[in-house]
Amino acid sequence: MEPTLTELKEQRLQKLFSDCQQQVIAQIIGPFGLSTAMFEDRNGGNVTTVHNFENASADYVAEKDQKTYAASRERYDRSKLKDIKQSVKDKLKAPGIDGYTGKQVDPVHLEADHVTALKKIYGDRKNHLAYNTGEGLDRLSDVANNTENLVATHRDVNNPKRAKDILEFADEVIDGKTQADRLELDPERMRAAKERSEDFLERTANRAIRVKQTGELLKTGANQAAQMGMRQALGMLLNELVNGLFNEIKALIKHGVEQGKTLFEEIRQRLVSVAERVLKKIPDAVSQMFQGGISGFMSNLLTFVLNEFLSTAKRFVTVIREGLIGLFRAFKMILFPPAHLTPDQALQEGLKLLGTVVVSSVGILLQETVKTFISSMAFLLPVADILSSALIGTLSGLLSAFLAYQIDCMFDRYRHGYDERFMDELIADSRRREEFAQGLVELSESSLRNVSAFNHSIILYQGIGQTLADSGRMADATLVSLEQTVSETREQVAKSVAMIEYIESSQRDIEDFLELL
């Protein structure tokens, strides 16, 4: 027999008190305990993105890229870059063709020009990240001095061009004539050289950054996965241990020492019981370790992706890491409910997990503010971190338990209210259906009776028609007989009249004869 709504409310209230204890312990041990000890989140995440390197402060750059970040902000100094190798210069000059004009030129007068100037290449901060200039400018120099970025041209072109863009240089007007006209520059050659240079530089830098970031993501992701997996496993076991100790102490205070035992024996027995429960949780802890590992790796990747577009502070990095595993568990519960839960119950449990994620995330974002407030009191400064973690963890746990309680109550009201309305509606609908069915039966019976009567009428009409047809035939025969009789009667009458006339004539003759006698 299912409990009533009142009984459910009482059960939910008792569960709230139990959940408050468990949630507070879980929050203090997890996001506001073990995470603080095991993770050192930083602004921008563990892998430096191009967005953060170009647009954010050094705080958003990973530790290993700090030297490169500093080098990218230094003033351009041509002397720090390697010069073009003589072998490359000789190779460019050998054909004796000017790369910008297409004319044959004495190789003595040809010089190697950087299509994209060294200053522009150095000024692109993305190149510093790609070629790790914090360790030196050799890689950047090698790319800049590649033949894809070099053109052999006459010194009369190279000297005035200097660090200018070749197309902009060609459009310069001097004494009423453009440099292109003065130096007879070929527009197609210039455009082709510029496109080749820019494509090479962009492609090479992107490939170098992909290689760098892929390696770093795999390394930091594996580290985050291991740490998060360990944190989840330890968190579950510690949570079971602390809750077990709390419950055993509460039971010991309430019931006292069992008769015949000493206090030491009672405590030892209860500790053994707690240890056994913790050991039974090891398989679940292993499962949590696996889920935490996936969450740690994915949170590291997600943080990197987000920082490709915006710079996230370390608190948001923590929220991503802590929230992702909660979201994973919540959506797993909703989309793939356990066999013992209905879809409705799985949705209820999933919403409670999502509520915990939201409350914990808000708590993490507020922790820095609370820590700052506590630090403002000099005597609390040494324990500001501990106090802020404990305070926010406690509040987050209580709010999570209360939110779960409200979700349970909402579903209880929904189910009971819905069931009552649904049953009333079913009963009313059943009655309506019964009345409608009865009406259909009566209508069907009446229709069948009408059909039967109609069928009988048709049979009668058929009989009447047959009778009428027979009567008609008989009438026709009678009419023919009457006509024949009338005709015969007329003939007989005519014969009778003739006979009477003959008799009268004979009688007159006899009378006349008699008179003569």
Image: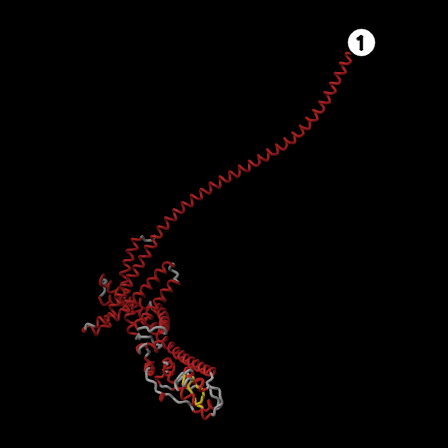
Taking depth in this image into account, of 423 and 439 the one nearest to the observer is 439
Q: Is residue 173 visible?
A: yes
In the image, residue 61 sits, relative to residue 348, either above or below, namely: below
The quarter of the rendered structure image containing the C terminus is: top right
Q: Is residue 293 visible?
A: no
Residue 165 in the figure: left or right of residue 400: right
Which element type, helix, strand or loop, lies under badge 1? Answer: helix
In the image, residue 491 sits, relative to residue 464, either above or below, namely: above
**Residue occupying image coordinates x 73% and y 18%:** 497
Number of labels in the image equals 1
- Where does label 1 land, which residue? 513
Residue 372's spot in the image, x, y percent? Answer: 23, 72
In the image, residue 452 sits, relative to residue 82, either above or below, namely: above
Residue most extreme to the left: 379
Residue most extreme to the bottom: 108
Dot 1 amino acid type? Phe
Residue 142's spot in the image, x, y percent? Answer: 41, 86
**Residue occupying image coordinates x 34% and y 60%:** 348
